[in-house]
Amino acid sequence: MPLRLRSLLASLPFLLLPAPPMHAAQPLPPTITEESQVPPYELPQPLLSSANTPILSPSQWETLRRPELLRLFETHVYGKTPLGRPDALRFVVREEIPNARGNQATRLRVALLFDGTETGPQMELLVYLPNHVPGPVPVILGLNFDGNYTTTAEPDLPVPSHWAMGLFANKLEKHTPSPAGRGIHQHLWPYAYALEHGFGVATAAYGEIEPDADGFAPQGPRGLAPLPESGAWGRIGAWAWGLSRAMDYLETHPRVDAQRVVLTGFSRLGKAALWAGAQDPRFAMVASFGSGAGGAALSKRLFGETVQHLVARNAGWFTPSFTQYAANEAQLPVDQHELLALIAPRPLLVTSGSTDLWSDPRGEFLSALAASPVYQLLGHSGLPPTMPPASSLLESRIGYFLRPGAHDVTLEDWQALLRFAKKHLP
Ligand code: GCU
């Protein structure tokens, strides 16, 4: 074919495209990744009530400011969780293998049937408990992106049929688990390492609780409760609710020390872990990995992903009123340091990847620093004011770890988590 004809044909699809509608969304502004370009911002003070009452005692924090902040996050960020543990919730142990992983662990697959039925909303919890520790053990609990079978190469875990995200998984058909996914996220879940150190691990797929896309709310936990009058909950709220149900199960297991359940999560699942930890005091410790905007990172500091980016792509993670703060962050009556403060006085570790600028490592550190006065009021250590170099763990009760590298979870994050947990949850 002559070249000119070929290039004319190649351009045809573009000629046929309709003009963009006049109301098309404005393009997002360029992402700020230079410290010198961050506009000035002011953070709300965690120890000052909405009515300007200074919070000077632990009891004022517990009775006045903490409930107030929870309400603010419900109203403006994540929505209200209108549902607790359903009366009908049922646990069905689908499998218990006492000598899994070369006898390193007992492995359980437990179905959590949210409405008590096999056909209703549910999630399967994969649990490993170390065999060499006789007594009740601490357990690290977190959601995974693509299915329990992606977190380990063990060949006998079934390939599930729930919605999956397709994280880093170019070879997988998006949203559809397949045998090719077995073990693809093993590096995010170093089970052997945790087990050797006497920790159990439990995980479930977030997309089984509720798929991460619009339109699925009625089929998941959000379908089980009437919508709250104000501040309908978003998907982060639904996933956080699922973490609390996992806790309901862990509390029933005699080999789990329910006083030492550590909640963790990466990225959007770190956001869910922080919100679950803020609402449910049964979690003894929280560790977020690269949770970024809408997680540990400050919203009013415009660096990397902003509220505008968040709601442009993932408005459904949040309560609808959160969208009004896109490009309007200064008006938000709360900021994410106050989410971290809601976890006080429980130990909290925030980790970031040093080159993960989209998640704003410095904004995560500054957030933990700005939450520190609450830890101090409650009798614990806060962060020192200087951001640490990569690889050094700040082990104050609200701690921080900058892992060298990108948006990911590596053994180094888990090493920091375990060291931190051993220090704070003896
Ligand atoms: C996107 C999103 C982030 C989120 C991340 C993830 O990058 O913008 O907010 O944390 O996905 O969950 O992997």
Image (cartoon, rainbow, N blue to C red):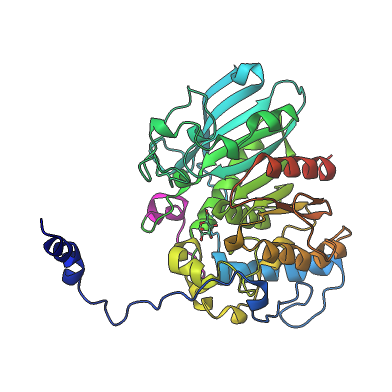
Which residue reaches farthest front? Answer: 2
Residue at image location 48% in from the left, 26% down from the top: 157
Instruction: Give the side of residue 52 with respect to residue 41, left or right.
Output: right
Residue lying at 76% horizontally and 65% vertically, measured from the top left: 371
Please indicate whether residue 82 sits to the left or right of residue 340 in the image: left
Residue 37 percent location from the top left of the image? 63, 77
- Magenta stretch? 216-231
Q: Nearer the viewer, residue 422 or 306?
A: 306
Magenta-colored segment: predominant secondary structure: loop
Q: 249 above or below 128?
A: below
Residue 390 is left or right of residue 169, and the answer is right
> In x, y percent, where is residue 313?
44, 64
Task: Confirm whether residue 319 shows in the render.
Answer: no
Q: Is residue 191 magenta?
A: no
At horizontal 76% and vertical 22% (from top left) the residue drawn is 134
- Residue 37 in sight here: yes
